[in-house]
Image (cartoon, rainbow, N blue to C red):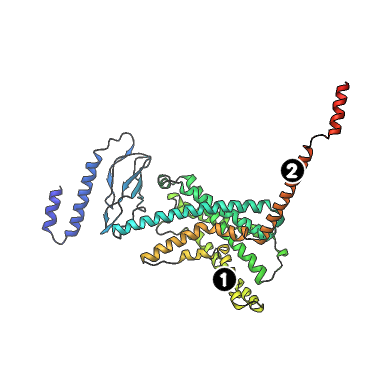
Amino acid sequence: MLLHSAIFCTLSLNVALPCIASLLTSLLERYCEVLSSLYNVTGVYCNSTTDEIGTCWPPTTAGQLVARPCPEFFNGVKYNTTRSVYRECSENGTWASRINYSHCEPLLMEQKTFEVYEVHYRIVLIINYLGHSISTAVLIVAFVVFLCLRSIRCLRNVIHWNLITTFILRNTLWFLMQMIDEEVHERNEPWCRLVTTIYNYFVVTNFFWMFVEGCYLHTAIVMTYSTDKMRKWKFLFIGWCIPCPIIVAWVIGKLYYENEECWFGEVVGHRMDYIIQGPVVLVLLVNFIFLFNIVRILMTKLRASTTSETMQYRKAVKAILVLLPLLGITYILFFIDPGKDDISYVAFLYFNSFLQSFQGFFVSVFYCFLNGEVRTAARKRWHRWQDNHTLRVRVARAMSIPTSPTRVSFQSIKQTGV
């Protein structure tokens, strides 16, 4: 059969390319048949077949997810064969129509360059783990500080407290998502989709609490509105409730159009993640406007003061650096295209990984540990504890003083008389 196809292709030059394609297909099918003969499958199973890419799928027991190496070449492009392509054998013994080639990466660079990138990706992963670990630990300490110091529970610090809470929950879910292995990811387990949904909810709430921070500062500084008239429940509603319909809409979109791979990533032709990314970008842009107005008012007040011009700029720069992590403006950098240059891309990778993983750390340091109000309250609490501790020690010592000699003698004489 193969010999006849080869002879026919040599006789007709006009149909050379279709014949070559047909010949290659026949060869692949023959190879798949030989490979399938090595498998001994019983019961309900899917027959061996070759897909349009040329990947051979051997006989497989029903209900299993099959992994095969990515093709080495396709359309003249070399691919990384250490990655896998996935296809599911249904319970009724038929192959799923969808084949997941999303993990196959083209090797568009030299092997040495590829190895260098692998090293960079591993370092970036370490930075992410280290940054999230340090941030989570510091955030938990800041959370406990705000919890214990009841004397500073004004609206401003309550907003800080809720923002810190969203960072803790977001980082915790980030660690949980790193524990999901590739097989669970491919099977699209329900609990895996639930984890992804909860993580995205905390991501959105995190950004909306950054918006609440910006709204509070802008209202108090730019609009000179009395903070006593602001209602806490309104900010709580914005931070915790408004993200709910956004996440519900995203879940519905994923369920009907991108119900695969634990709802990570996107499917070609659908952009369900824009349901989340749209409001997040809008929040960042509004916070950027808030930052511009706050700095503008601050510079106006500094120019009206008697301080030197150098000190004015120092205070303005300090205010900007402190407000950047609070309002989440640094996340705007994630939407910048680093270009095709290797050095700029690697620098962009490191810079963004550092900012994203240490964002909670900076918020905790600036708005808890370096907060003058928090430090004063903590110092008073510490002095009060020291005074109480000293008083308890003195009382304990007084209670442990031995009985006076006169009394001892009287008691001993009385006992002797008895």
Question: 216 or 349: which is nearer to us?
Answer: 349
Residue lying at 20% horizontally and 53% vertically, measured from the top left:
22
Question: Residue at (20%, 57%) from the top-left corner?
Answer: 18
Q: Quadrant of residue 118?
A: bottom left
Residue 45 in the image: x percent, y percent? Answer: 32, 38
Q: Is residue 241 visible?
A: no
Q: Is mark 2 on a helix, strand or loop?
A: helix
The kind of residue tagged 2 is Val
Q: In this view, does 209 lie to the left or right of 189?
A: right
Residue, x 59% and y 55% (percent of image)? 164
> In which quadrant of the rendered view does residue 162 lie?
bottom right
Residue 157 is situated, as x and y percent measured from the top left of the image, at 66, 59
Name the image quarter holding the C terminus. top right
> Which residue was labeled with disc 2?
393
Whether tag 1 and tag 2 are in contact, CB under 8 A, the answer is no
Near-viewer residue (327 or 417): 417
Amino acid at the residue labelled 1 = Val
Residue 317 disc label: 1
Q: Which of 413 and 6 is in front in this view?
A: 413
Q: Position of residue 127 (x, y in %)?
A: 46, 55
Residue 180: which disc? none
Q: Which of marks 1 and 2 is nearer the N terminus?
A: 1
